Image (spheres, grey):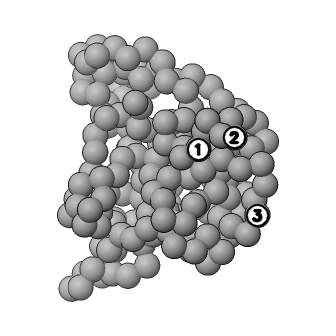
């Protein structure tokens, strides 16, 4: 299983990036979604993470993998760490990006909740699901106030120690936020 997510932009404004604490009982990875609405007691920068409970009101952030294993020219080193399988557990701090309209992301298909029900394809939407940490595919946006629209479904070289070859991904743009 490949867990990756990163924005397809050279620079992300720092006001869109938040530090969020993974809540008790959760194990999260890059590509998962999380709410960041309440600051941790005594902090003015770190949020307590929670799960989406109302897709008509909640505005989740997406956890990014930050591309640590990539060289400056975009290649992945042979024998490098396989960071697509890193899990964040309760108490860990993760970097997550607020979903701003027209921002584009590459997300592993493994991070989509019901990819077998509505196949990820160009024109299909990714919307949050109540009580889930992942986006789900949907033919329509419905009542969600945050949605991404899939533009393409490329394969990505995942590299790492195990030489995993290629993983399926989606390129998706935020269309509602």
Q: Name the residue under label 2.
A: 118
Q: Name the residue under label 3.
A: 142
Is 18 on the left-hand or right-hand side of 145? left
Q: Name the residue under label 1.
A: 114
Q: What is the quadrant of residue 70 in the picture?
A: top left
Asked if disc 2 and disc 1 are in contact, CB closer than 8 Å, the reply is: yes
| Residue in the picture at 31% in, 35% down | 85
Quadrant in which the C terminus is drawn: bottom right
Report, in whole angstroms, how far the alpha carbon at label 2 lies from the one at label 1: 7 Å
| Residue in the picture at 54% in, 35% down | 109
Q: Position of residue 158 (x, y in %)?
A: 41, 23
- The residue nearer to you, when weighing 112 against 175, is 112
Q: Where is residue 129 in the image (x, y as percent from the top left)?
A: 57, 61
Point out which mark residue 123 bears: none
Classify 99 as above or below 137. Answer: below
Is residue 65 visible in the rendered image? The answer is: yes
Asked if disc 3 and disc 1 are in contact, CB closer than 8 Å, the reply is: no
Q: What element carries label 2?
A: loop
């Amino acid at each position: 299983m490949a867990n990756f997510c990163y924005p397809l932009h050279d620079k992300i404004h720092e006001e869109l990036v938040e530090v969020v604490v993974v809540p008790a009982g959760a194990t999260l990875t890059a590509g998962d979604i999380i709410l960041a609405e309440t600051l941790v007691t005594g902090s003015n920068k770190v949020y307590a993470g929670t799960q989406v409970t109302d897709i008509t009101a909640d505005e989740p952030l997406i956890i990014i993998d930050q591309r640590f294993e990539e060289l400056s020219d975009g290649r992945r080193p042979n024998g490098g760490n396989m960071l697509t399988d890193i899990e964040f557990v309760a108490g860990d701090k993760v970097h997550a990006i607020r979903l701003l309209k027209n921002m584009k992301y590459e997300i592993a298909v493994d991070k989509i909740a019901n990819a077998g029900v509505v196949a990820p394809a160009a024109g299909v939407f990714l919307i949050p699901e109540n009580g889930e940490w992942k986006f789900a595919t949907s033919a329509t946006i419905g009542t969600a106030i945050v949605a991404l629209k899939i533009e393409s479904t490329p394969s990505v070289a995942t590299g790492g120690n195990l030489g995993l070859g290629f993983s399926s991904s989606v390129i998706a743009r935020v269309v509602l936020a």
